[in-house]
Amino acid sequence: MKIAYKIAITILIIYSCSVQKQNTGVNTSRNNDLIPFVEYFVISDGEVISGKAFPGRRIDSPGYSYNPEMQQLELYRNSISDSTGIKLFLGIGRVLKGVSGRGVSSFIKEVKNFPYKHEELIIESYSDSTLKFTLKNKSFKLKPKESYTYTESKIDSLPNNTIVKTTTKWKVDFRGFVKK
């Protein structure tokens, strides 16, 4: 459970639509032994504005962990059956907070072709250590250790005169590279 909370805290650091850059010295050259690793998380945080809302659903169990120093991806569920032709590993996750629910859940997808679509995220292409994306009809590029976050809020009326504000963040992190 500690890993789930560490992942959630890492994801929730960015609060607005932005691209953040860091230079960390991690090997970012294209190498046949290294595959790009991207995380795509959807974070939903619900708060009661008035009335009383019941707690949302509970999710848990991260499906993987990533060690950037060792450039290793450890899968807890769903093993990779065939690594031939994998061009990118995509970590897909969901974080629920407040009345939206509680917990973190994640899993890994192997991307073998571009463009690749998962829900509202499209990974358009990869070249020269740069990934091109489209999320919510907005195009952007990321290099290793860069992030992009898109945020929306909405207000809903629930039964019993309850009003809830839900803030949803879609976060894309180009974490770096992992070994095959």
Image (tube, helix red, strand yellow):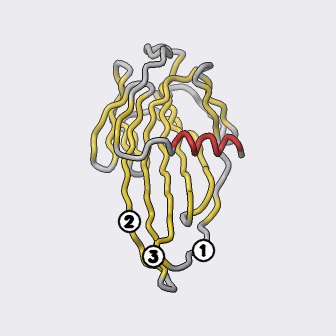
- x, y percentage for residue 43? 49, 52
Mark 3 residue element:
strand
- Residue 54's tag is 1
- The structure residue drawn at horizontal position 35% and vertical position 18%, both measured from the top left corner, is 128
The answer to whether 179 is drawn above or below residue 74 in the figure is: above
| Quadrant the C terminus occupies | top right
Question: What is the C-alpha distance between the residues marked 1 and 3?
Answer: 12 Å
Viewer can see residue 13: yes
Viewer can see residue 180: no
- x, y percentage for residue 4? 65, 45
Question: What is the C-alpha distance between the residues marked 1 and 2?
Answer: 18 Å
Task: State the residue position of label 3.
Answer: 163
| Residue type, label 2 | Lys
| Residue type, label 1 | Phe
Task: State the residue position of label 2.
Answer: 154
- Residue 46 located left or right of residue 114: right
Circles 1, 3 touching at the beta carbon (< 8 Å)? no
- The structure residue drawn at horizontal position 38% and vertical position 60%, both measured from the top left corner, is 153
- Residue 176 located left or right of residue 105: left
Instruction: Return the residue nearer the eye: 7 or 49.
Output: 49
- The structure residue drawn at horizontal position 62% and vertical position 26%, both measured from the top left corner, is 67
